[in-house]
Image (cartoon, rainbow, N blue to C red):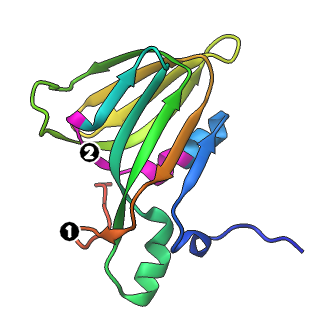
Amino acid sequence: MSRDASFEDGAERPLRLTAEDADDVTVISSLAQDAVFPVSEMAWKPAQRRFAVLLNRFRWEDLPAAERRGRDFERVRAVLAFDDVTKVSSSGLDRSDPEIVLSLLSITWMAGEDGAGRFELTLAGDGAIALEAECVNITLQDVTRPYIAPSRKAPTHPQ
């Protein structure tokens, strides 16, 4: 008999998820929420039609186990890659200082015609990145072992 996946199933294994539709984007957005990264860790490769970010992702999937066991919360370095991207634009970002750290709040997909559409990456502080894409084709892949979050706390958002 099969069972639904639980948060504990991802406890000690690196994530490697792909998104191919709007529902999948919601899942990846929730797992990438509150990820932080320096502006210098973004890369747009027009010839490969790929936009990627190396980010420090809070391990939301580990939150219940960490709370239950009373241990420190963790982050992990992960690559968030968008393929089949035709155009990248941004607003509210100062890309002149490579040390500026950005915080990802959400990823949304706005469908257009014939499967194409636009991703919006909403950042803390009124920043945003827009990606025009031919389809939904995202990968979120952990690339390091988890480490203790510097704050030792889970991110919170004012109500």
Residue 36 covered by magenta stretch: yes
Q: Which residue is mark 2?
A: 37
Mark 1 falls on what kind of element?
loop
Above or below 17: residue 151: below
CB within 8 Å, label 2 to label 1: no
- 109 displayed left or right of 142: right
Q: Earlier in the sequence, mark 2 or mark 1?
A: 2
Mark 2 falls on what kind of element?
strand
Image quadrant where residue 42 sits: top left
Quadrant housing the N terminus? bottom right
**Amino acid type for the residue under numbered disc 1:** Ser
Counting from the top left corner in percent of width and height, residue 65 is at: 48, 80
The crowd level at tag 1 (other Cα within 10 Å; few <14, some 14-19, many 20+) is few
Above or below 122: residue 147: below
For image coordinates 49% across by 20% down, the residue present is 48
Rendered image: mark on residue 32: none
- 13 displayed left or right of 66: right
Q: Which residue is mark 1?
A: 151
Q: Residue furthest right?
A: 1
Q: Residue furthest bottom?
A: 69
Image quadrant where residue 76 sits: bottom left
Q: Which residues are magenta?
A: 28-40
Of the residues tagged 2 and 1, which is closer to the observer? 2
Residue 33 covered by magenta stretch: yes
Counting from the top left corner in percent of width and height, residue 93 is at: 20, 26
